[in-house]
Amino acid sequence: MSKNRVSRRQFLNYTLMGVGGFMAAGMMMPMVRFAVDPVLKAGAEGDFIATKVKVADITNEPQRVDFNFDQKDAWYESEVTGTAWVYKNENGEIIALSPVCKHLGCTVDWNADKKNPNMFFCPCHYGLYEKDGTNVPGTPPLAPLDVYPHQEKDGILYLGKAQPRGGA
Ligand code: FES
């Protein structure tokens, strides 16, 4: 008889541990899946959200557009208000800019600084952006304002998720 022979007791132990392990894994998998599922779910980044703005009403003067959407943050769902600065450029193209300052995240305003008219102005640290969202060198922001992709459906402006552009 070989020295490595498995005793009946050892064989039973191994078998029970194996079967027990399979059963435990079978019970744990749905629980683990339930726990992490919202985190793994792909976000709805391709979604466009309807605003209340008619494309025909957009002028070349930036206007503040607020829009509401449901945001799912893992297990927590809430209604969020987004904001964009929207106008038509000299070619008649719609430009939708994020109001979030690229310095430290304050909200920029259009034409709010008397010394720098017709520019986006961030009051927190005197950040300045051109009308097209380009950051003015020498002011704190180091990148242009993010841009919302947009669509027109039935004459209404829809906005996607704001995307960053390259630095100036
Ligand atoms: S947060 Fe806008 S300039 Fe600092």
Image: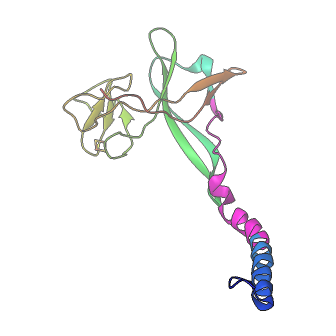
76 to 166, vertically: above or below: below
Q: Quadrant of ligand 1?
A: top left
**Image point (80%, 75%), residue name:** 23
Q: Residue furthest front?
A: 1
Q: Position of residue 16 (x, y in %)?
A: 79, 83
Looking at the picture, tell me which residue is in the foreground, 27 or 71.
27
Residue 141: say if magenta.
Answer: no
Q: For this view, does 156 lie left or right of residue 161?
A: right
Question: Residue 8 lies in what quarter of the image?
Answer: bottom right
**Image point (65%, 21%), residue name:** 152
Q: Position of residue 137 (x, y in %)?
A: 22, 28
Looking at the picture, tell me which residue is in the foreground, 167 or 28.
28
Q: Residue furthest bottom?
A: 9
106 to 92, vertically: above or below: below
The N terminus - image quarter: bottom right
Q: Is residue 78 visible?
A: no
Q: Please say which color scheme the image uses.
A: rainbow
**Image point (28%, 25%), residue name:** 117
Residue 33: say if magenta.
Answer: yes
Q: Position of residue 140 (x, y in %)?
A: 24, 39
Q: For this view, does 89 lie left or right of residue 35?
A: left
Q: Is residue 131 visible?
A: yes
**Image point (32%, 26%), residue name:** 119
Q: Position of residue 168 (x, y in %)?
A: 29, 26
Q: For this view, does 136 lie left or right of residue 7?
A: left
The stretch in magenta equals 26-52
Q: Residue furthest top?
A: 91
Numbered label tally: 0
41 to 55, vertically: above or below: below
Q: Residue furthest left?
A: 138
